[in-house]
Image (cartoon, grey):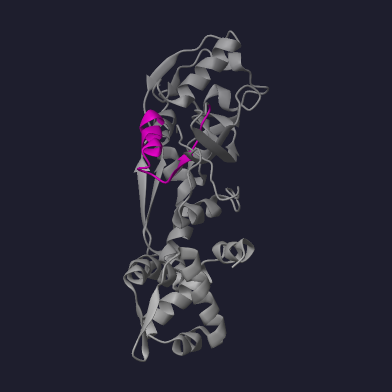
Amino acid sequence: MPPSHRFAYKGDRLKPLRAFCQTARLGSVSRAAEALFLSQPAVTLQLQALEREMGQRLLERSGRRLVLTPEGEALYELARPLVEGFEGLDGAFKERLRGMDAGELNVAAGSSTILYLLPRIVAAFRAAHPDVRLSLHNVTGASGLDLLRSDAVDLAVGSMLDVPADLDYAPVYRFDPMLITPPDHPLASRPDLTLADLSPYGLILPPQRLTTYRLVDLVFQRNRVPYTVALEVGGWEVIKQYVAMGLGISIVTAICLTEADRARLAARSLAEYFPSRSYGVVVRKGKYLSPQARAFSELIQPALFERGGYDDTGQSGR
């Protein structure tokens, strides 16, 4: 046969391989044609083309049945799993889609993100995907980055200032910096509050290793305004409680302020001096999100990672 005909069959081997496997299984060209909804001549042509392509006799007649030659046996062992896999693709795909509502999802986040940002999102995810086992890993800083890089978590949610080259960060929410004081504090009602007005009062801040402390220090240093730290303590809830007790003032992110804080704290925006803090989703660069991770990110922001099949995000600080 001319080379162009050989090339046509070589470009689409599935059809002749299907015909070959059905004939080998059923022992008859006519029965294979019936199973494939083809004419007998069409199946015969496909078998002949396959034998020419392989350069071997694959089938031979034994009585009224067609049986495999030794070469045909070898090809059948290789071709049958491929053909059966393709034939079952639709069912396997539908089964895989049903499996999206099972499995597990691991998310890294800092305490403030878990406490203030994620409750609504977690509730919505649990309602939509009750069979997915969701694990929230309460980690910050380098620990969270390590989990991302080792694929111990699918994604992270939180705030990032500096994004490493191997991670991608998609900011979604922004929150203003806020000064919090007791309601009767002199700064609570001072008009036209300046950064220098905070200088005489001791600050209650998170530990130095965290982003908030570093950001506060940077702003005061740049504006050449002295400041004092009265207390270092972790956790916005603890900081708010100590401020309410009159042990100092603090600069927090608005994410942590709730309706319950209105009675015990006075809050004023410091957006004139401090940048707002973004919170979003982080993944390892180039990481493909699982269906569960994609569903979770869609609840944070729809179409957050529609980028041709690859997804970008990373880890958070607080």
Up the image or down, 177 lies above or below 208; here it is below
- The residue sitting at 38% across, 22% down in the picture is 232
Please name whichever residue, 184 or 233, is drawn nearer the observer in this view of the structure: 233
Quadrant including the N terminus? bottom right
Up the image or down, 22 lies above or below 145; here it is below
- The residue sitting at 55% across, 11% down in the picture is 221
Percent of width and height locating residue 40 = 53, 87
Where on the picture, by quarter, is residue 76?
A: bottom left
Please name whichever residue, 90 or 68, is drawn nearer the observer in this view of the structure: 68
- The residue sitting at 42% across, 44% down in the picture is 114
Quadrant including the C terminus? top left
Please name whichever residue, 181 or 291, is drawn nearer the observer in this view of the structure: 291
Please name whichever residue, 10 or 287, is drawn nearer the observer in this view of the structure: 10
Query: Per the image, is 156 magenta?
Result: yes
Q: Residue furthest bottom?
A: 64
- The residue sitting at 52% across, 66% down in the picture is 13
Residue 212 in view, yes or no: yes
Query: Per the image, is 285 magenta?
Result: no
Q: Residue furthest front?
A: 1
Q: Report whether 314 appears left or right of 195.
A: left
Percent of width and height locating residue 169 = 54, 37
Up the image or down, 311 lies above or below 241; here it is below
Number of dots carrying numbers: 0
Where on the picture, by quarter, is residue 8?
A: bottom right
Percent of width and height locating residue 296 = 49, 53
Percent of width and height locating residue 304 = 59, 48
Residue 263 in view, yes or no: no
The region drawn magenta spans 141-161
Q: Residue furthest right?
A: 192
